[in-house]
Image: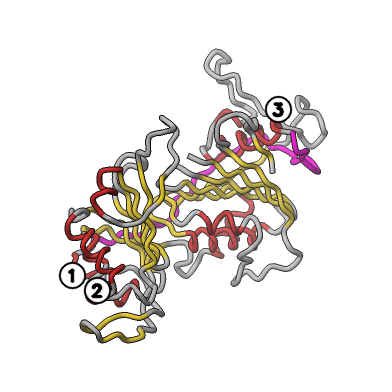
Amino acid sequence: MLDISSHNGPKPRCYFTHAVLSNFIDYDLPPTKKRPFTTIAAQTTSHTVDILLPKSSLPKFQEGLGNGKGTFQYARVHMKLSDIIEGDFFNHYVKAGAYGWLAPGVHVLISGVGNIVMLSQGRPGIDPVYLLSEGMLRLEVNKVMYERMGLEGKVIPGEGRKHVKARFAIEINLRLPSMVRGKPGFDRVVWAFRNVLNHSVTWLFHDLEAITDGSGPIAVHQPLVRKIEPSVEELDGAVMFVTPGSLEQDDHSLATELLEWVTMAANLSPRLQRNDSIDSYLSKYNVTLPTSDGDAGGHPETQDLARIRWHGFAHASFVSKVFMTALKACGDDWFAISATSFSGEAYVILKTGERTLTWESLD
């Protein structure tokens, strides 16, 4: 792993890792404990997902995204936190495989129900922000709200004044058997949601077990359903690179230049085109990465590129399917995937041959 910051400096902002893919990969059941698959799974939701690949690989990639695999749906809905832990919504979407309640003192095992991910509105680090995923509810609030709620949480490290505890994070596993009516811990959560965090907020909602079409218990909240389809754009005549056989631990410069090239290509920058004639006063960028003849300033090869982009409320499971589709479609050729989260975190994965190069950016 390349630590791009010094040991005595501020918290690292970008981590670089490289890994070798297994000889055999089950495209229907990707690995869960190896990179870069762990990187994809760690970022629960993303608002923008990009795939960058050679234009020659585009038809096969699009074929792999057929039958609806390249689209997803999510809903925008207005709800209070208390709505999540009440009635059919709680039993159907949250208490998956856990104990729910029919009436005070009457508990039943709920099975065969859905699983959802929800993200509230709000500016990370400023406004209250809530995330529900796999039954785990994470609340990020300021100090005043935290002290009023009476729930246990942890301080969120800040980049400002070191000794001021500005924000707190509270994590509640709503699938625990104790998260039912009549239990003290759950009753405290109910009180906090009804007396402190009792305002209605806008949520992004995605059903992981079924098509998000606005049906089911969420229908009473009148969700606005949106269907996201990929947009395809092309960049012809882009100056290409040849990835080195290995990257040394302290070779920060080459890792940065590779990331810069991928980022500019994903943004379809004309600065990468061989025939680009931009005035050097406006842009001094040129591809200085190793080329096919080993000369960074020699006669680099060019290639026509394609970028496929999704912009919406994408879950990590969808990004994983897109990555596996590209892995199968491109074969030994290269491709890159990037995803940016709502909190500002992002990652870029460049696959070349049997290797993957991964950059993880922290907000």
Tell me the kind of residue under disc 3.
Thr
Boundaries of the magenta span? 224-250
Q: Which residue is mark 2?
A: 217
Horizontal and vertical percent for residue 222?
19, 64
Kindly report the distance in space between the C-alpha atoms of the residues bearing marks 2 and 1.
6 Å
Q: Residue shown at 74%/34% (left/top)?
A: 250
Tell me the kind of residue under disc 1.
Val
Residues packed near mark 2 inside 10 Å, few (<14), some (14 to 19) or many (20 plus): some
Q: Does the magenta segment cover residue 226?
A: yes
**Circle 2/circle 1 CB separation < 8 Å:** yes
Report the side of 61 relative to 69 (left or right). Answer: right
Quarter of the rendering containing residue 361: top right
**Circle 3/circle 2 CB separation < 8 Å:** no
Quarter of the rendering containing residue 123: top left
Tell me the kind of residue under disc 2.
Pro
Q: Residue shown at 54%/47% (left/top)?
A: 338
Disc assigned to residue 220: 1
Q: Which residue is mark 3?
A: 288
